[in-house]
Amino acid sequence: MKSVFKNGEILIQGKYYLYNNLWGAATGEGSQSLWESSFDNSHIAWGTSWLWNGQTDTIKSYAAVVWGWHWGWKIADTGLPIKLTALRSLLTKWSFDVTHTILGGTNVSYDIWLTANPTADNENPTGEVMVWLYNTGDITPIGSKKANLLIDGVGWDLWEGSHPVSGWPVYSFVRTDNTKSDSLDLNKFFQYLISFGLDSTSYLLSVEAGVEVFTGEGRLNTTHYSINVECR
């Protein structure tokens, strides 16, 4: 463990940055820390531990590694933003271990932001795509279940709804069985959504990978995370 970050702090490592995002902490009581374990130009290893109680149906935190934009924060030379029609592939690899001392609602997931404005700074995005790899507790995504599908032989449930405050559309792919290691081309999820009605002229603004915590006590250790953007 090299550095520990608390209370919303940000650590920049090359084209990645780690963000201990405690955006929902006011709905409960607790704490969370985040650390970087190792880093090179291609991948990063990191971890987070938490203890949260309070409202079981509200998110307390989303500690994550970020590639691209986050409400005004940007790192150059990530290949983002990019129009979805110009994206050939968005390859990611993520291996992690997650343990629970007190079981509660959590999901280990990608949180992906779309926009109609490629020069977005601090304004809200125009769409959100989540990909849940692992979840516990009695939690569900925003909206309602719309479809079940296969991507590369893996089953996913697609949920669709609107952000309860800002109103942008939220699409959530929930893996039908939990995994702690996956290699994905996230562009395949976008292409499915385009056939589902997503505006193909949208820009991919940011990809985040982290753990949403509602309640409980636990720890996530990412042993490998990488992302690569390929254009057409």
Image (cartoon, helix red, strand yellow):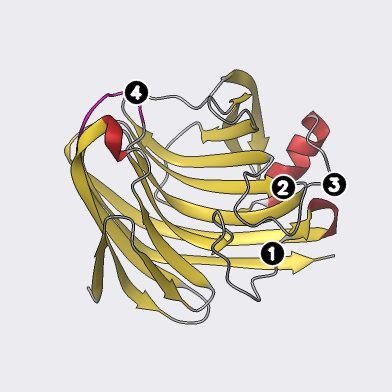
Question: Tag 2, which secondary structure?
Answer: strand
**Disc 2 marks which residue?**
115
In the image shown, does 183 or 196 lie closer to the viewer?
196
Q: What stretch is highlighted in magenta?
A: 53-58
Kindly report the distance in space between the C-alpha atoms of the residues bearing marks 3 and 1. Answer: 14 Å
Give whichever of discs 2 and 3 has the lower sequence position: 2
Give whichever of discs 3 and 4 has the lower sequence position: 4
Give whichever of discs 4 and 2 has the lower sequence position: 4
In the image shown, does 8 or 195 lie closer to the viewer?
8
Residue 64 occupies quadrant:
bottom left
What secondary structure characterizes most of the magenta part? loop
Looking at the image, the residue that sits furthest to the left is: 101
Q: In which quarter of the image is the N terminus?
A: bottom left
Above-or-below relation of 200 to 182: above
Residue at position x 31%, y 31% in the image: 105
Mark 3 residue crowding within 10 angstroms, few (<14) / some (14–19) / many (20+)? some
**Disc 3 marks which residue?**
201
In the image shown, does 221 or 210 lie closer to the viewer?
210
The residue mark sitting in front, 2 or 1, is 2
For the residue marked with disc 4, what is the amino acid?
Answer: Asp
